[in-house]
Image (cartoon, rainbow, N blue to C red):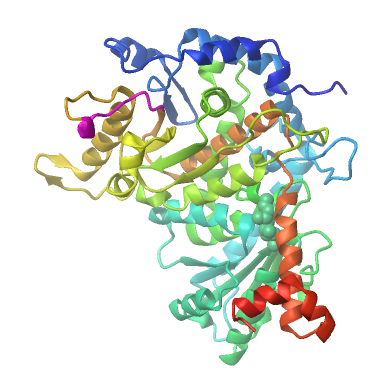
Amino acid sequence: MDRWQAFTEVPAYPRLRKLAQRPFDLTQPHSLTPQRIARYRCSAAGFDLLYATQRIDDEALDGLQQMAAQCRLLEQFRQMRSGTVMNRIEGFPSEERQVLHTACRDLFSGHPSAPLATAQEAAELERLRLFLEQLQQGQITNAAGQPFDTMIQVGIGGSDLGPRSVYEALQAYRLAGRNAFFLSNVDPDDAAATLRKVNLATTLVNIVSKSGTTLETLTNETLVRQALAAQGLDPARHCLAVTGQGSPLENPARYLRSFSMFDSIGGRYSASSMVGAVMLGFSLGMENLMDFLAGAAAMDTAAEEPELRQNIPLMLALLGIWNHSFLGYPTLAVLPYSQALHRFPAHLQQCDMESNGKSISRYGEPVPTKTGPVLWGEPGTNGQHAFYQLLHQGTEIVPVEFIGFRHNQYNQDLVVAGTTSQQKLMANLLAQALALAVGQDNANPNKRFPGNRPSLLLLADRLTPATMGALLALYEAKIAFQGFCWNINSFDQEGVQLGKVLANRFLSLMQGEQDLDERQTSVEYALLKQAAVI
Ligand code: G6Q
C-alpha cells in the first residue's frame, strides 16, 4: 500500500500557510454580506451548515479542497467504511483492527460497504427486537410477574458517554413509563445516589464492557448485584450484558440476555452499536432506535460526497484544521443551543480528544505540527451568562461550533414579550455568531469587541432520533477526516494506559502488599502518605 501523506507533505500545504497569514477579515465593512451568508452554507442529512462567519474565503476553500484530494481523505474514509485495517501503527505492535462503527448503521441501502460486519450487527439488532417484544408482551418479567420499566446502564468511557448523551438528547421520545439511568464512575456516591432513584424490583441492569475487564464497571456490577440480592432479587433475572467476544462477561448463566459488540468497533465510536442500542431500544422503542441509525447512515453517506462545499463532515473537519493548524487557535468550543444536548460536548470531548490527541504518526514518527485541539462545551444560553466574556474579549481566540434547532422537541412553548422561548434561543444563537464575527468598536476600550472570532452554525429542524444519529455520525466522520489529515491513528488510546497501571500500584500499596523497605523508597507510598489516604 502507498504511504499515506500528512497534510504538511502535500503541495496545498505551503499555499494554505501563505493564505493563513492574511485570513479573511470579518470586521471590514461589507465583509459579511447577505450573499456571503447565502453562499457559505451546505446541507445534508437534515442539517444545514452555515460557515460565513469563519475567517475563510474562496481561495482558502479551494486550497482546502486540494489538500483533501492530495491527502486522499475520501479514499481513506471509504477504505475505513469497507473494512481496511485503519487502526494500526506501521512497523510497531498496535491494535491492528478494522474500524467499522459505520457498519452498525449501514442497514438501509441494500449495498453495505462492509457486508459481513453489517450482517453481524443486523443479527444482534434482530435479537434485541425479539427481546424487547418479549418485554413488551409480558413474556419476560421480574419474579413477581411485574414488567421492567427501568434500565441502569453500567459502563464507562465509550460504554457510557456516547449512549448517555444520545439518551439525554432523546428523552422527549421515551416510551411511556420507561426510564434509563447510568452508572459509570467508581465513586461510591454515584452508585449510592443512582440506586436510590430506582425501584430495583422492576429494573434491568445493563452491564456494558467490550473488554469485560474494566475496573470501574466490574466494581459497579458487583455493587448492583449485591443491592439486588439484598432485596431478595435474583441478579441473573435482572442483569444483561453487552460485551466483546471472548470477554470474561461472556457467561450466559449470569445474565438474562447477552449481546455482542465486535472487535472492529472502538469504545468511543460504539454508541450506534449494541453498546447504545440495548438501552436506547428499551427506553425509546425499536422504531426510534432504527430512526437514529438511519440518521447516522444518511450522514455517513453524505461524508462520501466529493465536493467539499457540499460535504458537511468534510467541511467541518477542514474548517477545524484551518482554525487549529493554520490559524493556530488551540481549543474548540461546541455550544449546543439545546438543553437536551447537555452531555453531547462531554461525548465529543472523549471522541475527539481520545482520537486525535496524538503525538506520533501512523508510521511511529513524531508529528511535525499540532494535532487535535482541546475541545470543550456547554449548552449555549447558560454559557452566555458565564464564559462568553472570554469568547468575546479574552486574549485567547476560541473557534465555536454552535448547534441549534428551529423547533423544540415537546411542542410546548409560550409567547413572552412577543416571542416564544424557541425564538429567543435561536435569536441568541445567531446574535452570538454575528457578535463574535464582526465585533464592535467603541471609544471606551472596555466596551470594544475585536471580532474576527470564527464560528459556524449547525442547524436542523428539530432534535429527533434521526437528527441525533446524523449529528453523532457527523462528528465521528469529522474526527476521522482530521486524523487522516494529520496522518495519525485516531482509533487507539494508548495514552490512557499509564494512569491505569499506576492506579493498580497504588491499590496494591493500599492493600499492604509491599514490605517496609519498598515502602520507604516508593514515590507512590510517599504520595499516599502525604495525601493522607493511608
Ligand atoms: C474508548 C476507550 C474507552 C473504553 C472504556 C470502557 O474508545 O476504549 O473509553 O470505552 O475504557 O472499556 P470497556 O468497554 O472495555 O469496559
Residue 451 part of the magenta-drawn span: yes
Residue 159 visible to the viewer? yes
- Residue occupying image coordinates x 58% and y 66%: 184
Residue, x 18% and y 25% (percent of image)? 442
438 with respect to 487 (left or right): left
Location of residue 72 in the rendering, given as x and y in whole percent from the top left corner:
71, 19
Foreground: 87 or 210? Answer: 87
Q: In the image, residue 59 lies at what x, y percent?
A: 51, 7
Q: Looking at the picture, tell me which residue is in the foreground, 291 or 158.
A: 158
Please state, as top left, top right, bottom left or bottom right, where the N terminus lies in the image: top right
> Is 301 displayed left or right of 368 in the figure?
left
Q: Quadrant of residue 393?
A: top left
Q: Residue furthest top?
A: 59
- Check the image and name the residue furthest to the left: 417
Q: Is residue 312 above or below residue 466?
A: above
Q: Is residue 155 magenta?
A: no
Query: Residue 160 at x, y = what percent?
Result: 58, 59
Residue 113 seen in render: no
The image position of residue 169, as x and y in percent, is: 44, 51
Task: Count numbered badges in the picture.
Answer: 0
Main SS of residues in magenta: loop
Asked whether, in this view, residue 61 is left or right of residue 365, the answer is: left
Point out the stretch of residues depicted in magenta. Answer: 445-454
Q: Is residue 371 left or right of residue 36?
A: right
Where ligand 1 lies, by image quadrant? bottom right
Q: Quadrant of the C terminus?
A: bottom right
Residue plotted at (34% across, 46% down): 387
Question: Which of 460 and 399 lies nearest the eye of the viewer?
Answer: 399
Residue at (58%, 62%) from the top-left corner? 133
